[in-house]
Amino acid sequence: MPKEKLLNLITRLHDSFGDEEVSPQQQQLLDDMKLHIHNINEPAPTDPDMLQTIETLIEDIEEDHPKAAGLARDIMEILVNIGI
């Protein structure tokens, strides 16, 4: 199921930061991503846009956390493939 796979990837993304402290902005972006994962019969959140949130996160972590940025790209690819 895409929902479980996405939640798993988000958990892996958070874990990939290791012992380093996640900035408040990065934590907010991770929380925003989780907010958008819902069942089909539930209303979708409107702000911020999921793909925009992921792109912002990638830009923010790309240099210091390339592995985490790769996981975020995987999440974005799944979302694009399922039509989000």
Image: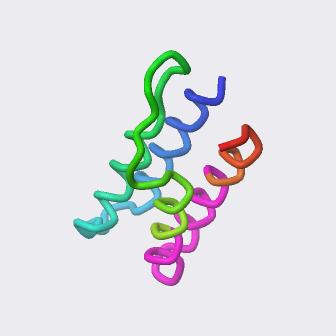
- Would you place residue 75 above or below residue 2 in this image? below
State the quadrant of the N terminus. top right
Residue at horizontal 37 percent and vertical 50 percent from the top: 32
78 or 14: nearer the eye? 78
Query: What is the span of residues highlighted in magenta in the rendered image?
Result: 58-75
| Horizontal relation, residue 68 to residue 34: left or right | right
x, y percent for residue 64: 46, 80
| Horizontal relation, residue 16 to residue 80: left or right | left
Residue at horizontal 61 percent and vertical 33 percent from the top: 5
x, y percent for residue 21: 26, 67
x, y percent for residue 38: 47, 27
| Horizontal relation, residue 22 to residue 39: left or right | left
52 or 76: nearer the eye? 52
- Residue 37 is a magenta residue: no
Residue at horizontal 51 percent and vertical 16 percent from the top: 41
- Residue 66 is a magenta residue: yes
Tell me which secondary structure the magenta stretch mostly adopts.
Answer: helix
